Amino acid sequence: MRAVSFTLNGKPTRLTVDETRPLLWVLRDDLNLSGTKFGCGEAVCGACTVIVNNQAVRSCATPIGDVDGKQVLTIEGLAKGDRLHPIQQAFVDHVAYQCGYCTPGMIMGAYAILLKNPKATRADIVRELDSHLCRCGAHVRILKAVETAATAMKGGAR
Amino acid sequence: MNFEDHDLERDEELVVDGPTTFPVDRREFVKLTATGLLVLFAVDPTSAGQETTRLPSGRQGYPTDVNAYLHIGSDGKVTCFVGKIEMGQGVMSSLPQLLAEELDVPLASVDIVMGDTDLCPWDMGTFGSLSIRQFGPVLRQATADARAVLLQLASERLQAPVDRLEVKAGVVSDGADPKKTVTYGQLTEGKRIERKLEGKAPLKPVKAFTIVGTSARRRDGVEKVTGKAQYAGDVVPPGGALHARVLRPPAHGAVIGQVDTTAAEKLPGVKVVRDGDLIAVLHEHRDEADKALALVKAEWTRHDPPVDDKTMYDHFLKTAGPATTAAEGGSLAEGEKLVTEVVEGTYYDSYVAHAPMEPHSAVAAVEAGKVTVWVGTQTPFPVKNQLMQALKLAADKVRVITPYVGGGFGGKSASRQAIEAARLATLTGKPVRVVFSREEEFFYDTFRPASIVKIRAGVTASKALALWDYKVYCAGERGAAQFYNIPNHRTAWTGGWSGSSGALHPFAVGPWRAPGASSNAFGRESHIDVLAAKAAVDPVEFRLKNLADPRMLRVLNAAAKKFAWTPKPAPSGRGVGVALGVDAGTYVALIAEVAVEKTTGKVRVRRVVCAQEMGVVVNPEGALQQIEGSITMGLGYTLSEEVHFKGGEVLEHNFDTYELPRFSWVPTIEAVLLDAPDIPAQGGGEPAIVPLGAAVANAIFDAVGARMDRMPMTPERVKAAMKR
């Protein structure tokens, strides 16, 4: 057990926990943030993706101790009040989801891509999102949504 | 009846065992429906698979054949209660369209409550592309009847005959004096009106539709992109829930011996529960429960059947039993005389998993002797009955609530996790959460069965099909019957697409998006192409020549046109292939274009054109989403998905070995929805997945001249076929 301090969705957060516990379950069980989903437990599906210091990470395979002193962003922290982030808005507009279970991880994955490369092409997006699984087959719409968001964000939307 | 064993082709036989009472006395329901118009949807139990509900004796209740409720509040809000569930297919958005259309109210004024056994009347489950096709007409008729009641009330209020009344956006006006108006809300204000539906009110004609047929926006978007959408595993009952991990056998059929839980019990905060075969470790945190489970030592005696993924086809041929004839006509002996050659073919398919992204999840809480279970299930009412049996509880002591379901595809008809959560909550007196690990998800999946199709067929000298002798093992009847114009034919099947573990399958098999139909289409449409190639006729032309069904001809022509198909006998080297299917009342033609990497055998599907005729299209955008989803998901069973097993042991544990379709696999998808206003709305969730495997197999043959006889068409199998 040790104290772990980090910024979670803009808010300073301090926990006394076993630092080996997975970030995913600390978010879900200790912090009541259930938007981050459990899909495989082995970092092979992407449903639990969150952003740590501007990088996409699989929270099921990230020990909570690793985020000490870092900035953590989850799906709950993306919208500004009622105003959706351009990626979220594009997912709604293109209906880039069906069951919605992979959606939070998919959006956080897309967020990291556009953060790193605002000019990401379709090929870049495909390559980067290829490790994210969607079983309903919303892929073509997800790609369109991320492209639309990229255009909106180039215009200054954040 | 075992709830895992729905057979959609025999809906009328569906009866749920055990009583189901109707909710007449629950607080929230009474509160909501204290005033206003309450309409009971009565349906013919044989036509819509509805059961008869029984009320405990002595209690006044609603009619026994109630299917759903419609409630119009004094504020004009319309609430629809249906036992269907939302698993991504979009019915929480499309069913309100049907209702708003028939009632003449704004779509935004309609709320829908789904899959709650206390609030919604009985429903057999959400599967088989039936929500629009079968429940839709019930909902429309109920709404039309409700409208008739409202018009009668308006007639009295406005002192105008019913036939002079007009309705727009929930406001009734007198056609002769448009200033005289009354809203639906005003009509129902302060009243409690109950009517049993008679089904006599005329339905709105299709040509008058203004809401049905539009791509109304889905209702679940904002919740799903913000992480607010709740799935069963996200539910936190008051006081929180303990995570439970249940001890699992290493293989189906294994019997437990000695169990040592001492190490697990030493972990702080861990509770161990044993109740007969149910052994579980519980902890406030999931990861701590995982650790505890890993410390449980158990001895198992295995009873594996002598079959694995290499010997299964021989096993099926030996154990499947006598076949049933599903369709026949003419004489096979006569056919053999007519054909130039009897061409034989055998086509194999593999076990595939549902693999929804949300694993089976449930949270159970017990309060004052009543068990409430939040379950990710396609069948809330059958699950309720199972809970009643498992816990020996009366119907009013069990409630199943279905939040958003994170993908089902047939795999969430079975809901073992709900029973486990409820048993553990009862045993511990605390709310309990059971969320399957991915390994459990594969282990307990009711796989689509592996199967064999054997065909003997032939054409006359004028290249007309004259013989079709078809036998399928283990894929069932759905989609088996051929639809070509063949004078001498027989279709026989043995081994259905669902069943418990036993002599035939070492684990349970069950409905998987258009159950068995893809396996049947792979056999049929591959063999049609074999015959076309032997006759040196272009595969589209060959089909056009041998089809008589106008709906099938129409989708094939539409697909060929959209694709800009140019006729050439296969193999042409272009890598194009066609396949047809009919499923859930919907006709589909797919044309696929592939590239085959000759050195590796790797297949890349570049483009898929789909022409679909599904009767009246309720929400075109929703229909397109289902087509895209079907084609994308279908790439998996076509190219990569295959469950390996050894006896009762499932060797797939996670997505590292069981490969789902990815972004880099996705082709350009172009869909054409054909207008068919005279045909009632048909199913949309499954049909387009059916012919994909066959279309890709035919495209591979066209590309490299290799005939694929087994799915999935992995690089190794394609390479091997190229060498044959």
Image (cartoon, rainbow, N blue to C red):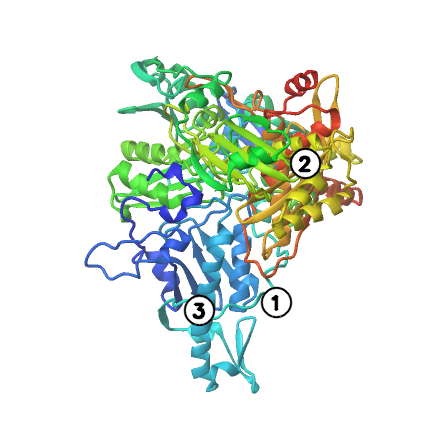
Residue type pointed to by label 2: Ala
Q: Position of residue B663 (x, y in %)?
A: 68, 32
Residue type pointed to by label 3: Ala
Using the rendered view, name the quadrant where residue B572 is placed. Answer: top right
Q: Nearer the viewer, mark 3 or mark 1?
A: 1
Would you say the residues marked 3 and 1 are in contact, meaning their CB atoms lie under 8 Å apart? no
Farthest residue to the left: give it: B58
Residue type pointed to by label 1: Lys
- Counting residues from the start of the chain, the first of labels 2 and 1 encountered is 1
Q: Position of residue B266 (x, y in %)?
A: 34, 16
Which mark is on residue B207? Answer: 1
Please tell me whether mark 3 sits on a helix, a strand or a loop: helix
Using the rendered view, name the quadrant where residue B495 is placed. Answer: top left
- Whole-number angstrom distance, CA of label 2 to CA of label 1: 47 Å
Res B303 seen here: yes
Does residue A148 lie above or below B257 as drawn? below
Which mark is on residue B146? Answer: 3
Would you say the residues marked 2 and 3 are in contact, meaning their CB atoms lie under 8 Å apart? no
Same-chain status of marks 2 and 3 = yes
Res B693 seen here: no
Please tell me whether mark 1 sits on a helix, a strand or a loop: helix
Which mark is on residue B461? Answer: 2
Q: Nearer the viewer, mark 2 or mark 1?
A: 2
- Whole-number angstrom distance, CA of label 3 to CA of label 1: 21 Å
- Counting residues from the start of the chain, the first of labels 3 and 1 encountered is 3
